[in-house]
């Protein structure tokens, strides 16, 4: 009887392990993948515009903000990369067409005009990103991904506060 009990327990534990593995894999949804692709594109957009602002901004607060955006959006990319790799999501090769147009526009501006336009775009983009992260944090069922999303959401929320503040100061 002991051998039968051990056999049943071993089989049950094996099945439970397989089911947990399947459940963990099934937790990733198309919505999670879509979010990650959008968030990654957003990071690249912010990095490219902010790299330009690091060199062209004249207001020291705008320069400091731009530098922070480059560092922190690169950190978000690093945090999300394992998920993108595991889910087969290729990183964007550059800014999307709207942000490339914005980069071109910004590149033609200087002084206060540049600073105001850059911060205006950052303010708008970060509000949209915060909404995106908030929705994903509510909907994802992948616990590891949710932890990463929540961390990144807090970073983006801080960016919103900084961008709002600078936008008011420059207007």
Image (cartoon, rainbow, N blue to C red):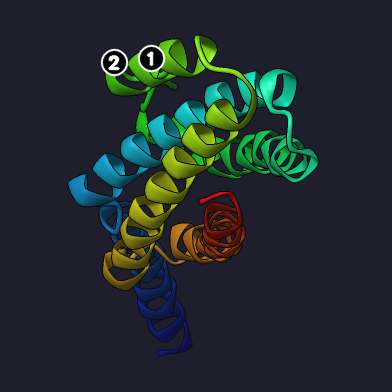
Residue denoted by label 2 = 97
Query: Residue 40 falls in which quadrant of the image?
Result: top left
**Could you tell whether 118 is left or right of 39 in the image?**
right
Q: Name the residue nearer the viewer: 163 or 139.
A: 163
Relative to 62, residue 91 above or below: above
User: In the rendered image, is residue 86 in sight?
Assistant: no
Q: Quadrant of the N terminus?
A: bottom left
Asked whether residue 27 appears in the rendered view, the answer is yes
Name, please, the residue furthest toward the left: 30
Q: Tell me which residue sits at (43%, 39%) in the image.
A: 121
Q: Are marks 1 and 2 in contact (CB under 8 Å)?
A: yes
Q: Can you tell which mark lies on residue 34?
A: none
Compared to residue 155, the image places residue 98 above or below, namely above
Within-10-Å neighbours for mark 1: few <14, some 14–19, many 20+: some
Q: Is residue 61 left or right of residue 148?
A: right
What residue lies at 36% left-to-right and 59% top-to-bottom?
24
Mark 2: secondary structure:
helix
Say which of 35 and 29 sits in front: 35
x, y percentage for residue 108? 50, 9
Residue at the image position 46 percent from the left and 57 percent from the top: 145
- 32 relative to 73, above or below: below
Rendered location of residue 88, percent (x, y): 36, 27
- The residue tagged 1 is 100
Q: Residues within 10 Å of mark 2 (few under 14, many from 20)?
A: few
């Amino acid at each position: 009887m002991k051998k039968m009990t051990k056999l049943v327990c071993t089989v049950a534990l094996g099945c439970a392990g397989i089911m947990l593995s399947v459940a963990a894999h099934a937790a990733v949804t198309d919505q999670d993948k879509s979010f990650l692709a959008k968030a990654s594109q957003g990071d690249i957009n912010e990095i490219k515009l902010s790299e330009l602002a690091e060199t062209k901004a004249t207001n020291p607060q705008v320069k400091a903000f731009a530098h922070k955006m480059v560092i922190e959006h690169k950190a978000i990319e690093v945090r999300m990369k394992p998920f993108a790799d595991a889910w087969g999501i290729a990183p964007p090769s550059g800014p999307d067409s709207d942000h490339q147009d914005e980069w071109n526009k910004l590149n033609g501006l200087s002084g206060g005009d540049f600073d105001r336009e850059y911060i205006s775009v950052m303010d708008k983009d970060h509000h949209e990103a915060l909404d995106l992260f908030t929705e994903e944090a509510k909907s994802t069922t992948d616990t590891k991904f949710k932890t990463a999303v929540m961390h990144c959401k807090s970073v983006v929320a801080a960016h919103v506060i900084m961008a709002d503040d600078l936008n008011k100061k420059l207007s």
